[in-house]
Image (cartoon, rainbow, N blue to C red):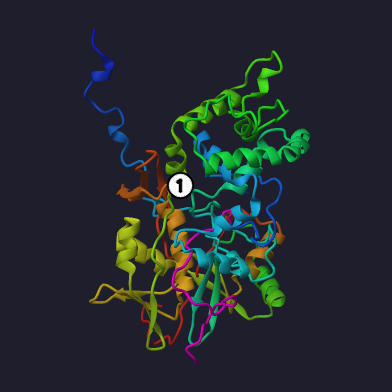
Amino acid sequence: MSEEPLFDPSLKKRKKKQVQFTVDPLGADADPTAPAPETIEPTTADGTAVDLGPATAHERMKLNGEGEAAPKPAEEEDIKAMFGDLKKKKKKKEIPMDFGDDSGASTPVPAGTSTPDAGASGEAVEDLDFSDLKKKKKSKKKANFDLEAFEKELKSTSGADAGGDADDDGEPAPAVDLDDDADLGDDPFAQPSVGEVLASVGSGNEAWLGSDRDYTYPELLGRFYESLHLANPSLLSASGGKRYTIAPPSIHREGTKRSIFANVSDICKKMHRQPEHVIAFLFSELGTNGSVDGAGQLVIKGRFQQKQIENVLRRYIVEYVTCKTCKSPDTLLTKENRIFFMACESCGSRRSVNAIKSGFVAQVGKRSRNKTG
Amino acid sequence: MSVQNLATFDPFADEGDPLGDSQDVGSQADYIHIRIQQRNGRKTLTTLQGLPKQYDPKKLLKAFKKEFACNGTLVDDEKMGQVIQLQGDQRAKISTFLIEHEVDKATIKVHGF
């Protein structure tokens, strides 16, 4: 047997200096090549909320600022991720089938067959990457607010939004008075969609100015954040800029039957997880076993490629590292009463996580070698 | 008047361990697990475990074999019950097959790389 890539139909030869360790922001359900569906259900089939994305108006504003005008760059940005490296990003985009596989959910869909529904995933679908929920956020907005009627307005004012965005991004303008930049948004709509409100406030003509109706909560909230960010431009960059990056796993082949995962301890340290836990997960997912050698490297039985290990690690991160509530990777895993609990350091949420169970392992190889089987 | 909240005895003391002795602590038993295993060379094995009771594993296996053009067998495991075992990497095919036949997508878990 050759030393060539095995077991991976969709593998392309690529140089892997730095790897994007992200999960498809649309989750496993989406074919990354296909344009994002106009509306995405905020929940997956199993009822889990998909959008773990920015929930605060803070982040929404940021998204609004970046995402509205340029969906394409946004999509590219989605790809930028945990193993962040920009060139890689482009590449990934060109080889979209990778994505189907990469999406942290468990179905590696063969290239080409992945339709938005084909990628089956039992897990809650979420991404690891916190700052790039733009597309999703947008569609969620559409789903939430009755935007059917205002879609047109949205389109017609997207130019104005872009203007506003430029202001948001480019020139933090702490000195600009709230009511002075009337040149930006001449948004005529008076509807309380958060995004639109966010886009329109600060432009001097808040939606309620023309009428004598009451203010709605989202409008006021948007207005609050607008003035907050005008006063403190640093908040915007601080809230969304952080990305969770991890060095790609380095996998070598030892002989023909074993693979060596060299930097397992580094990665564990980076994720703040016990190596034993990570290793147990790897073994149960790969349906194999192995050992840790003297140098702290993990020797895995079977041939595995970096990409494959990466996929498994990605899934590990989704399941055991990132907080489901706030998506922060800053979590602690503790064991109480035989149950693992994951406590988030940044938002304080606490949830139980599945125990690692290896499940059925078929007997491979000679029967005489395996006394227990 | 005594303050009830400050009573020192634990009203749940005789409840014991709420988790009981079940082995399934912290795991979801009702998932359909699809796993892959490497064999020698570039051969693989796909296993399907945790099939709900209402499906006949024999019939399903037959359908799988026909549909995916592979061989397969039904393995009896003491712990896991009956497990369908197919030759080759059929994970994606199995999951699409099951989804097409109205198995809830959320209950299917595909493992492996």
- The residue most toward the top is B1
Give coordinates of residue A111: x percent, y percent.
65, 71
Chain under label 1?
Answer: A
At mark 1, the secondary structure is loop
The stretch in magenta equals A1-27
- Which residue is rendered at x = 27% and y = 19% of the image? B5
Residue A64 seen in render:
no
Q: Quadrant of residue A222?
A: top right
Taking the spot 21% from the left edge, 24% from the top edge, the residue there is B8
A187 vs A108, nearest the viewer: A187
User: The N terminus of chain B is located in which quarter?
Assistant: top left
Q: Position of residue A95 (x, y in %)?
A: 61, 70
The answer to whether A129 is drawn above or below residue A115 in the figure is above
Q: Which residue is mark 1?
A: A327
Which image quadrant for residue A178? top right
Residue A11 colored in magenta in the image: yes
Q: Is residue A291 left or right of residue A241?
A: left
Numbered disc total:
1
Instruction: Locate residue A220, reporting x and y percent.
Output: 57, 23
Q: Main secondary structure of the magenta part?
A: loop
The residue shown at (41%, 43%) is: A351
Q: Residue at x 54, y 43 (%)?
A: A169
Q: Does the magenta segment cover residue B59?
A: no
Image coordinates of residue B23 in percent, x first then y, are 39, 55
Relative depth, front residue between B30 and A137 = A137
Give the residue type at disc 1. Lys
Q: Residue furthest bottom?
A: A1
Bin the neighbour count of mark 1 within 10 Å (Cα to Cα): few under 14, some 14-19, many 20 and up.
Answer: many
Can residue B86 be seen at all in this image of the molecule? yes
Apparent side of residue A282 relative to residue A139 in the rendered image (left or right): left
